[in-house]
Image (cartoon, coloured by chain):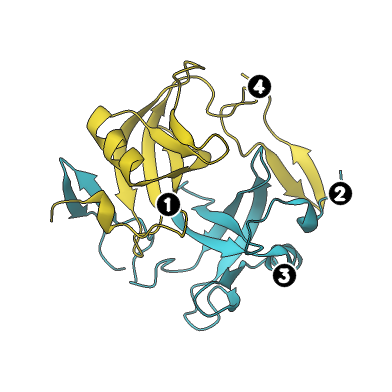
Chain colours: A yellow, B cyan
Amino acid sequence: MRFDPASLEFDAQGLIPAIAQDAENGQVLMLAWMNAESVARTLEEGRVVYWSRSRAAFWRKGDTSGHVQELVEMRLDCDRDCLLLLVRQTGAACHTGRRSCFFTAVREGEEQEIAAPL
Amino acid sequence: MRFDPASLEFDAQGLIPAIAQDAENGQVLMLAWMNAESVARTLEEGRVVYWSRSRAAFWRKGDTSGHVQELVEMRLDCDRDCLLLLVRQTGAACHTGRRSCFFTAVREGEEQEIAAPL
């Protein structure tokens, strides 16, 4: 079946969450949001284009930071309301300079930083 | 620092997205939602408790299906608005009987099923 971005289930703001995962080692890098057009552009360009909710603008990952996400494969879930993006990540996915945004773990009730900036 | 679920950034519905990842092989299994109390209960019980948006009720994963998610570690992202749950998954995470909900890939513009029910 031909994939149509409009067939996804978007929320009331027209957005769908997208998880970026390192295609090489499986590390979950970040979660951000897409609208139908950013899904289409990501597939066309082979580079991940999110929708920035804070800036209300397309966010072509890496355009300012150089930390490009090259799309290896897009997957959708059973409810068509979440995307999984397998990516080749250049440098840090996180704006703090860390490879992954998920660098804080909860261990025995305490927050613990488990990764340093690259 | 002591972790307080109330310190997370919840959306207008009081929810935060939670990604479940297989702690053993890194497979992304599903994304679902939590409120502050389900975050607290998950940490207390060591078993993942989501908030079902469709049923508007707590959803202790596996209670009816047997497909329990045992929490190995909870992580939060840099913006404190997304959780990553490393889990030990019994059986299928997906209600279709597949290990992961992300069993549909977009390849050359076509939807392709890449995993069968267990």
Image coordinates for residue A79, horizontal then vertical, percent:
36, 65
Q: Of helix, strand and loop, which one carries label 4? A: loop
Please name the amino acid that badge 2 sits on: Arg
Packing grade of label 1 (10 A; few <14, some 14-19, many >=20) is many
Query: Distance between the Cα atoms at labels 2 and 4?
Result: 22 Å
Query: Distance between the Cα atoms at labels 3 and 4?
Result: 32 Å
| Mark 2 vs 3: CB contact within 8 A | no
| Mark 1 vs 3: CB contact within 8 A | no
The numbered mark at residue A117 is 4
Image coordinates for residue B75, horizontal then vertical, percent:
66, 47
Res. A6 visible in picture: yes
Mark toward the viewer: 1 or 3: 1
Query: Residue A111's quadrant in the figure?
Result: top right
Q: Mark 2 sits on what residue?
A: B2
Q: Of helix, strand and loop, which one carries label 3? A: helix
Question: Which residue sits at x=41%, y=54%?
Answer: A82
Please name the amino acid that badge 1 sits on: Ile
Q: In this rendering, would A110 be left or right of B84?
A: right
Q: Mark 3 sits on what residue?
A: B45
Query: Distance between the Cα atoms at labels 2 and 3?
Result: 18 Å
Q: Of helix, strand and loop, which one carries label 2? A: loop
Image coordinates for residue A17, horizontal then vertical, percent:
46, 50
